[in-house]
Image (cartoon, helix red, strand yellow):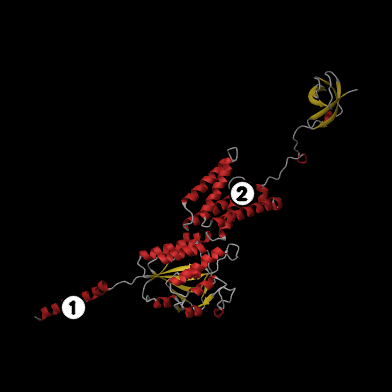
Amino acid sequence: MSLIRKWSALLFGLLLFFTGLSFPVFSQTKEKPVYVVPVHHEVEKGLYAFMKRSFQEAEENGAQLIVLDIHTPGGAVDAAGEIGKLLDETDTRTVAFINDRALSAGAFISLHTDAIYMVPNAQIGAAAVIDEQGNMADKKAQSYWRSAMKSAAQTNGLDPKYAIAMADPDIDLPQYGAEKGKLLTFSSKEALETGYSKATVSQLKEVLQHEKAAEAPVVEVKESWAEKVARFVTNPIIVPILLTLASLGLVLELYSPGFGLPGSIGLASLLLFFYGHLVAGLAGYESLLLFIIGALLVIAELFLPGGIAGILGISAVAASILLAGDNVKWMGLSLVIAMVISITVMILMVKVFGKKMKFFKKIILTDSTSTESGYVSNVNRSELLGKTGVTKTPFRPAGTVIINNERIDAISEGGFIEAEKEVTVVKVEGARIVVRETE
C-alpha cells in the first residue's frame, strides 16, 4: 500500500511539475516591440524612403511604439512635408527623441509626432524656409511653411504661436531670446515649460519608461547600403557635383582614344545618380529608359549626317535628368552648373594645361605637318626658276610648257601666249609655276 502511495505521489508530483512548466508558456503574452528609427543628418527624399520602409516594417510586426531618434540640422521642405504626412497617416504611436537638435525640417517632423522628449542640451526650432542660395524664400513659400508649422502644433494641442515664431522672424518673443528679426529656438528647458516637450530625458531608456514600454523588445532600424547611397546621392549639394563629373568625364572621353578613366568616371556618376534617385523613389524607370534612348541617339549621331539625332539625344538625356529629380527647377539649375563648370574646365585644360601635362598630351593632338618638321603639302619645283622652255599649247593663261624635255603645267603672268613660243620661268610657288614670253 505504501508503494502505491509512493508511486501515486510521484506521478502527481510529475504532473504538477509539467503543469507548472507549461503554465507560464501558455499564459505568457509577448509584449509588442518598440521600433527606433534614426533621423540623422540632412532631411531629404532618401530619408523619406527609409522612414517609409521602417514604418511599414514596424506596422507589419505589430509595434506598439515608433521612436524617432532625431539629430538633424534640417533639410528639404518638400521631403519634410512627405515625412509629416507619413507620421499623420500611421496608426502606431510615434514619439520624437531629440538626441541633440531638431532644427528647421527636423522641428517640423518632431511636431508631427504624438510626443516630444529632449535630452538636457537639445534644441528645437529655427525653421525658416531657405532657398538654394541660402536666402530667405519668397513670401509664398514662407506663408505655406508658417501655416504648416501652425497646423502641426495645433494637431497635438500645442500653443501654435511658438511654432509660428520658429518659422517667422517677425514674431516677437523676447522672453525666449527671439526678439523681432530672430527665429525662435527652444532649449529643452524652454520646450518643457511651454509644453512642447513632454519630459527631459538623458537616454532612450527613460523615453520608454515614460511611454510605459520599458520591458518591450527594442528594434533599432538600420539604413541599408542602398538607402545610404540614395540619401547621399539625392543630397542637393551632391547632385550638381555628380552631373559635373558625368559631363566632364564623357566630354574628355570624346577626345581620348578607346574607353578609359574619364569615360568610366562619367558613366559611374550617371549610374549613381539614377540608382540613388530610383531607390529614393524620386525617379521611375521611364526616366531611365528615356536616358538610354537619348544616349543611343547621341551615339547614332556619330554615324548619321544632319545633326537631328544628336539634338534629339541630348534633349532626351536632359529631360531624363529633369524627370529623375523631385524639384525640376533645382535639377535644371544643377544641369546648367554642370555644363558651365565642364566647359570652363575643358577650356582651362586645353589652353593652359594641355601642353604641360602628359595626360592631355595623349588625348590632345599637338603635332602639325609643318615644313620645319619635314612635311610639305606638295613638291616644290624651285629648281625650274629662270629656266627656259617652249610652249606646247596656247596659254589662256594656263597651258603646257616643255622644259628640258619635261612636260610641265604652268600659267602665264596673265597674258595670252601662243604655242611654240619661247618662255622663261619667272616664279615658282610650290607646284605653281609662272612663265613669261621671252623677248
Crowding at dot 2, Cα within 10 Å, few <14 / some 14-19 / many 20+, comes out as some
The residue that appears at 54% across and 53% down in the rendered structure is 322
> Which circle marks residue 13 in the picture?
1
**Inter-mark Cα distance, 1 to 2:** 86 Å
Image location of residue 392, percent across then percent down: 80, 19
- Of tags 1 and 2, the one toward the viewer is 2
| Residue nearest the observer in this picture, 82 or 394 | 82
Q: Residue at x 51, y 52 (%)?
A: 323
Depth check, front residue: 251 or 87: 87
Whether residue 312 is visible, yes or no, is yes
Q: Quick one: which residue is furthest to the right in this view? A: 439
Q: Quadrant of the N terminus?
A: bottom left
Q: Is residue 223 visible?
A: no
Q: Amino acid at mark 1?
A: Gly
Q: Classify mark 1: residues with Cα within 10 Å, few (<14), some (14-19) or many (20+).
A: few
The amino acid on which the numbered mark 2 sits, given as a three-letter code, is Val
Query: In this image, 29 relative to 437: left or right?
Result: left
Q: Residue at x 56, y 59 (%)?
A: 238
The residue labelled by disc 2 is 251
Query: Do the residues bearing badges 1 and 2 touch, measured as CB atoms within 8 Å?
Result: no
Image quarter of residue 136: bottom right
Q: Residue at x 43, y 66 (%)?
A: 87
* Residue 92, image x, y percentages: 38, 68
Residue 432 drawn above or below residue 53: above
Residue 274, horizontal then vertical, whole percent: 51, 54
Label located before the other in sequence (1 or 2): 1
* 23 relative to 312 in the view: left or right: left
Q: Which mark is residue 54?
A: none
